[in-house]
Amino acid sequence: MSSRRHQNLTLVGSVTGAVIVALDGTVLTVAQPTMQRDLHASFTQVQWASTGYLIAVASLLVFAGRLGDRYGHRQVFAVGSLGFAVTSAGIGLAPGIDWVIGLRVAQGVFGALLQPATLGMLRAAYPPDRLGMPIALRTSAIGLAAAAGPVVGGALTAHFGWRAVFFLGVAPALVIGVLALVVRIPAPERAADVRLDLPGALLLAVALVCLVHTLVSIPETGWTTAITLQLAAATAAGGAFFHHVRRAAHPLVPPSVLRSAAVASALGILVAASASVFGALFVGTYFLQDVLALDPLQSGLRALPLAVMMVLGAPVAAVLVRRYGPRRTAGAGMALLALGIFLFARLDRAAAAAEIGGCFLAMGAGFGAVMVTATAVVVRHAPVEHAGVAGGLQQTAMNVGPTLGVAAATMLMSLAGPGSATGPAHGDGPRWPDGAFVTAMGSTLAALAAVAALGALLAVKLPVSRADTGHG
């Protein structure tokens, strides 16, 4: 098989896998109320269908990437895709909410196998100096899935019920999984000394499970003794993990990756960017629906420029990285993201559609540029034999960041104004007067804009030029 055809097949598989996972999360949000009524489930049970998936994914991503380094990214990708298809079909046939929760956790395990492999395969198929555009196309596809997800999910749920949402990804996941097994694509030699660090994987999993569960619980329960204990457990397990990594002969995260200033800065940028933008989206959704009294479709259209700019801006970001280097591109992207959030913080009840759209436009352009640039640095800077671990770290940052942003936004809203930051569900009506909400929203979004601005400072540790980012 020619190298060009090999690269094209890898790109199609990587993009399709990333889209299936991204689409699954966005369409489920729209289907949750219908699922709750149909299965006679509580709000907490339905939330656990999402929380269980998120915890399973976040805790296993790095270990899943290491499995790809050890056994081959194509093989792990195939298992992840086929498992994702089977569990999706199982959820669509589930007789009760307990089955849905259990299968969602299993789906999270397969999603964790699938996601790092999509980046690991790209790293193995493309030379380091040609990775920018494939990663940009993958980012554009994720943005398109994020934009189309609520529309597709709403249409499927309205006409065929919530179960159709889960059947949506079964066929494409099966196809790419089978193709990954039967199409023999030449792969680079795997390093003989790649080992599976089970103690390190366990410590990291415990740290991430405690951290993610803490962040997910804060918006519902506020700061409690249980939250404090969970955070302490996450800190202790994280400290033990880093101590183990320094002493282990074959650690889960190799020292060459862990000590890289470029990789650490790129991961920090991804966390800061995703936390700030998803925190802003969380608060902005309540502003659009509860303060401006827009319905879900109208509020979705107001936010559409964010996804559109991610789709259109990602390939442009790849060109900018090639011309100006990762440092300038990521720094400019974070600055643009901070500007968009700060302008959003200044909106009030008189905000026009053009003003709101302009804020989301700047946020989408900045976030797309940051995702492409920081992801390329993480994947390209790691040696090819550690591409899976690098992909797992990137995906972990992109899972923890949004969860951190929503938790931070909730806490900041509560500190800035009276009562709870949110109502029981979007569109149920504000819990406090509009004026108080808008005031709290302004200070909260200003703080999130400051997080994005601080993230821009991390860009100084990124390579100046594209030539400095990779290993041969």
Image (tube, rainbow, N blue to C red):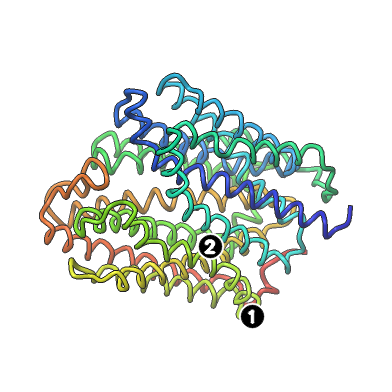
Residue closest to the far right: 1
Image position, residue 265 (x, y; %):
52, 64
Name the residue nearer the viewer: 93 or 126.
93
Name the residue nearer the viewer: 460 or 275.
275
Vertical position of residue 345 compared to residue 182: above or below:
below
Q: Amino acid at mark 2?
A: Met
Q: Are marks 1 and 2 in contact (CB under 8 Å)?
A: no
Q: In percent of the image, x 30 and y 73: which residue is there?
A: 355
Q: Amino acid at mark 1?
A: Arg
Q: Which residue is mark 1?
A: 323
Q: In percent of the image, x 32 and y 57: which residue is there?
A: 298
Image position, residue 133 (x, y; %):
66, 66
Instruction: Residue 457: give its label.
Output: none
Image position, residue 272 (x, y; %):
43, 60
Question: On the picture, is 364 further left or further right than 142?
Answer: left
Vertical position of residue 195 compared to residue 149: above or below:
above
Q: Which residue is mark 2?
A: 371
